[in-house]
Amino acid sequence: MGKKITLSVIKADVGSYVGHSNVYPALLEKARGMVSGSPLLIDSYVTHVGDDINLIMTHEFERNNGEIHQLAWDTFLACTEVAKKLKLYGAGQDLLSDAFSGNIKGLGPGVAEMTIEERRSEPIIVFMADKTEPGAWNLPLYKIFADPFNTSGLVIDPSMHEGFLFEVRDLIENKKVTFSAPEEIYDLLVFIGTRGRYCIKSIFHKQTGEIAAISSTQKLNLLAGRYVGKDDPVLIVRCQSGMPAVGEALEPFANPQLVSGWMRGSHCGPLMPVSVEQSTPTRFDGPPRVIALGFQLCEGKLIGPQDFFKDVAFDQARQTANFIANYMRSQGPFEPHRLPENEMEYTTMPQVIKKLKDRFEKVR
């Protein structure tokens, strides 16, 4: 048995610059100062997508470790104080409590963690999105781990041919169910097509039992009972040597899918793959963005990152996303650009109905 390494990716929006588009450099500096050199960590990398700070950390503790989560919580609190002094927008909006209780889950920040034994070579990709929700990973994860038209290794690689196990979470009922692909693909699709409720949490290699991918599934409006910002999920995917190749893991993002989020968390728009530098959503506070940073793990050290979506090969995807954004914006306040009533984060419907209740007449 080799040494186990845990990779923790924890994110939060603790103050935006300007509006909802970016993270002010002083906040990133504060975050790097808090986690860099921490005796708890083997290594760390701090980045952002849009207005979210993302902490990428490696350590030898198990998942859900209180000390690691405390470090992330303290980091976000310190960044919030900087944001408040600078009067940044939405300072501390993802922190739903004033007190840390041993685990950051349920307090607002998004969390994805996996514990692994490093293979001879351990390439991983950390995907991070802004202005969307955890269900945005459903389609890419399906394509990466279950679609042979996307991932040729499912057909021609003997170590992948048996398929993968998909753990799906019901975010409303707080339940989970596991599907085996390829034999239960149709059952799997019944659920994950409903992205607002059913989300792929983790994926496991069917033969070895090794974890292959893990996502954050926190939904802030469910945690807080009110709108406090979109969920802006993170995702970790292991690649190569029995797992999908790096190129196979990136391929689904070459054709932008429509996701929920965008302006006020209440609109449908294209998920645009961009570099870190381009991850500053401005048009109608969007469109939604996704970045992909690649690392080689070496005894817990993060060798990298490589900014994958910086590649010109994704220029066409960005052009397509802009075309889709133009079309969707032309629909204004009409569905499907505006989300259905039960999925909207902001809505005036109850107030308008109350105001007009006496003007509604029964149809005879």
Image (cartoon, rainbow, N blue to C red):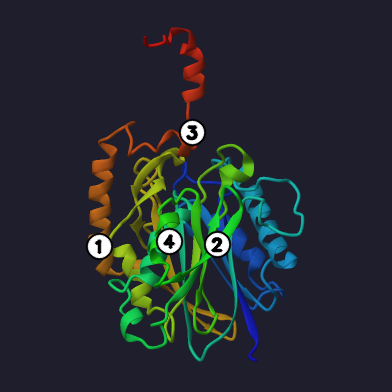
Q: What's the residue type where badge 2 is placed?
A: Val
From the image, tell me which residue sits under label 2: 177
Left or right: 226 with respect to 339? right
Q: Residue at x 28, y 46 (%)?
A: 325
From the image, tell me which residue sits under label 3: 346
From the image, tell me which residue sits under label 4: 187
Which callout, 1 or 2, points to the residue nearer the camera? Answer: 2
Which callout, 4 or 3, points to the residue nearer the camera? Answer: 4
Secondary structure found at label 4: helix
Which callout, 1 or 3, points to the residue nearer the camera? Answer: 3
Q: Residue at x 33, y 39 (%)?
A: 337
- The disc, 3 or 2, on the residue closer to the chain's N-terminal end is 2
- Residue 276 visible in the shown view: no
Is residue 131 depicted above or below 238 in this figure?
Answer: above
Secondary structure found at label 1: helix
From the image, tell me which residue sits under label 1: 315
Left or right: 192 with respect to 113? left
Q: What's the residue type where badge 3 is placed?
A: Tyr
- The disc, 4 or 1, on the residue closer to the chain's N-terminal end is 4
Identity of the residue furthest to the front in this view: 364
| Mark drawn on residue 257 | none
